[in-house]
Image (cartoon, helix red, strand yellow):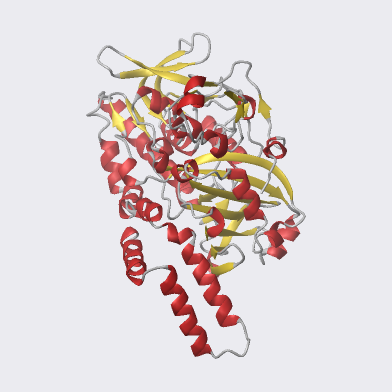
């Protein structure tokens, strides 16, 4: 490939494609490299996307037949012991009407391909089945292009955008983002379970086209800092469960055993009954938060999306941050190309733009959240167990007075966790999301 | 709980590269200097298996999460992306 491009993008995920689309719209010559057979072939997320960020790139995404699975109208949070658990949920008519497509589920194999198709329509060149193995640099260390695994696969560009995701072997190799520490990522596995559309509607109490998200914490991760989700697709459910990689390294628990036990939990089993597993995947989530974000720009390059550790672990938001950062990167690149300075100075506007956006504001707000979960393992062991046993006690009608039950519950709690520790936990928890 | 990961991997579509994209740098390190061998547990595709005097790498079923690259306590695993177009290809994602 001898052609010259103004911008080369590594990775055709939400970050790379948002950037490519915005650049192509401005008539900038852009090429995107994707290592999968097609965009989305390597990508996994829980499966929720947000209309706001997609709408910034493709305002008429519904009209353009974006492959939406279900519009989310209800969000549930479960806190589970090994035998049962608590359920808090919120549903609002607004999510069916005015705020329709605020959040919706997608399968990334279909969605990313569709999204890349829109960028191609605008003039971006998307090259699949091509792994970027290194970055080209000049004598001064400035990035001048990419090296791919194709024959004669060097491509020069004035700016390179690194958007190859959380497992960025490229960022690690080039040193632009140090390898994450095991405690900075969660390893999650996902299974897609097929069920008839009407069965899902009934089991989740929704109309056709509407869906539910369930975020799950508790004993399901066996005392490890972790989370599970159940999301509804049109005719399948996405089940994901994961734990901090550091915790997994220190326990002899296999991720797929966690998944199978989760599927057998009394609150999960009836939802997936007679469903057919169709696909099994694994992926990291960038849990380290604000303090693990590397320098996101330098001489001739920028980093966007989860390559840059942009992920809000508390709200499970990643794809939207990828899109927002990709778009801001594109704006910066367009300005730099126009001014003729694509060096570190010329691209510095990207950092400022990100700082001014919800992306960095949210990540900064929750910067202590990861540490909080890692340092308070009671959240995944003692607390859900105690909570469940207290609720079971109060709901058991056995001739014992409520007052006696309360006293026995209080004793049990005090025996399991010192009150000072509990108070500190609540304080640290409030502070970590404050 | 005994779960056969092979049943799960069977659901996936792989285009296997002839050349392995994962390599254990020095098997002696695994056997002599790594007591816990956590790769045998945390790998979601059970790529790593202990055989008599070595750990084998079934890279063909790798889900490409990257965990072994940073989770090996001895950083004894060389891991790159499979050649473009090879490896797992998601159907749903």
Q: Position of residue A116 (x, y in %)?
A: 54, 34
Residue B71 visible within the image = yes
Residue B93 visible within the image = no
Q: Residue furthest left?
A: A345
Q: Position of residue A130 (x, y in %)?
A: 54, 21
At a point 72% along the width and 65% down the height, the residue shown is A202
At a point 57% along the width and 58% down the height, the residue shown is A213
**For this view, does A143 lie left or right of residue A240?**
left
Looking at the image, residue A240 lies above or below residue A267: above
**For this view, does A418 lie left or right of residue A97?**
left
Is A183 in front, or is A57?
Answer: A183
Q: Position of residue A325 (x, y in %)?
A: 38, 40
Is A391 in front, or is A351?
Answer: A391
Q: Image quarter for residue A375?
A: bottom left
**For this view, does B13 lie left or right of residue A105?**
right
Task: Tell how many labels.
Answer: 0
Is A266 in front, or is A67?
Answer: A266
Looking at the image, residue A104 lies above or below residue B73: below
Q: Position of residue A110 (x, y in %)?
A: 62, 39
At a point 50% along the width and 88% down the height, the residue shown is A404
Quadrant of the drawing holding the C terminus of chain A = bottom left
**For this view, does A202 lie left or right of residue A102?**
right
């Amino acid at each position: 490939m001898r052609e010259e491009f103004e911008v080369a993008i590594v990775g055709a995920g939400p970050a790379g494609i948002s950037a490519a689309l915005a650049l192509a719209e401005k008539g900038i010559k852009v090429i995107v490299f994707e290592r999968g057979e097609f965009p989305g072939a390597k990508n996994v997320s829980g499966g929720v996307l947000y209309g706001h960020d997609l709408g910034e790139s493709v305002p008429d995404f519904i009209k353009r037949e974006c492959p939406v699975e279900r519009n989310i109208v209800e969000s549930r949070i479960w806190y589970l012991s090994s035998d049962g658990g608590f359920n808090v949920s919120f549903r609002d008519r607004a999510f069916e009407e005015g705020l329709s497509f605020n959040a919706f589920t997608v399968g990334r194999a279909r969605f990313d391909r569709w999204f890349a198709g829109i960028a191609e329509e605008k003039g971006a060149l998307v090259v699949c089945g091509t792994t970027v193995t290194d970055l080209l640099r000049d004598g001064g260390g400035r990035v001048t292009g990419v090296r791919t695994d194709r024959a004669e696969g060097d491509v020069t560009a004035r700016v390179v955008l690194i958007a190859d995701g959380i497992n960025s072997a490229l960022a690690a190799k080039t040193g632009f983002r140090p390898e994450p520490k095991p405690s900075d990522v969660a390893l999650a596995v996902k299974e897609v379970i097929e069920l008839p559309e009407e069965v899902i509607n009934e089991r989740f109490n929704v109309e056709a086209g509407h869906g539910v998200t369930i975020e799950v914490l508790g004993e399901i991760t066996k005392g490890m800092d972790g989370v599970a989700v159940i999301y509804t697709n049109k005719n399948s459910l996405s089940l994901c469960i994961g734990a901090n990689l550091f915790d997994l390294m220190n326990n002899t628990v296999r991720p797929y055993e966690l998944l199978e036990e989760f599927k057998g939990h009394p609150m999960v089993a009836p939802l997936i009954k007679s469903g057919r597993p169709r696909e099994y995947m694994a992926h990291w989530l960038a849990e380290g938060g604000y303090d693990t974000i590397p320098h996101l720009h330098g001489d001739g390059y920028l980093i966007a999306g989860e390559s840059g550790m942009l992920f809000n672990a508390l709200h499970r938001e990643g794809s939207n941050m990828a899109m927002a950062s990709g778009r801001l990167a594109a704006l910066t690149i367009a300005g730099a190309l126009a001014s003729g300075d694509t060096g570190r100075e010329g691209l510095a506007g990207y950092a400022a733009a990100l700082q001014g956006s919800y992306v960095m504001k949210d990540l900064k707000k929750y910067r202590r959240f990861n540490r909080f979960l890692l340092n308070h393992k009671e959240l995944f062991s003692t607390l859900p167990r105690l909570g469940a046993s207290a609720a079971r006690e109060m709901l058991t009608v056995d001739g014992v007075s409520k007052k006696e039950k309360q006293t026995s519950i209080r004793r049990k709690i005090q025996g399991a966790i010192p009150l000072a520790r509990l108070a500190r936990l609540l304080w640290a928890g409030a502070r970590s999301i404050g | 709980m005994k779960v056969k990961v092979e049943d799960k991997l069977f659901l996936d579509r792989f285009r296997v590269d002839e050349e392995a994209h994962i390599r254990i740098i020095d098997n002696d390190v695994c056997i002599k200097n790594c007591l816990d061998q956590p790769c045998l547990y945390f790998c979601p595709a059970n790529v790593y298996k202990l055989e008599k005097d070595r750990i084998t790498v079934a890279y063909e079923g790798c889900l490409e999460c990257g965990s072994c690259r940073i989770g090996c306590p001895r950083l004894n695993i060389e891991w790159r992306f499979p050649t473009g177009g090879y490896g797992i290809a998601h159907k749903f994602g």
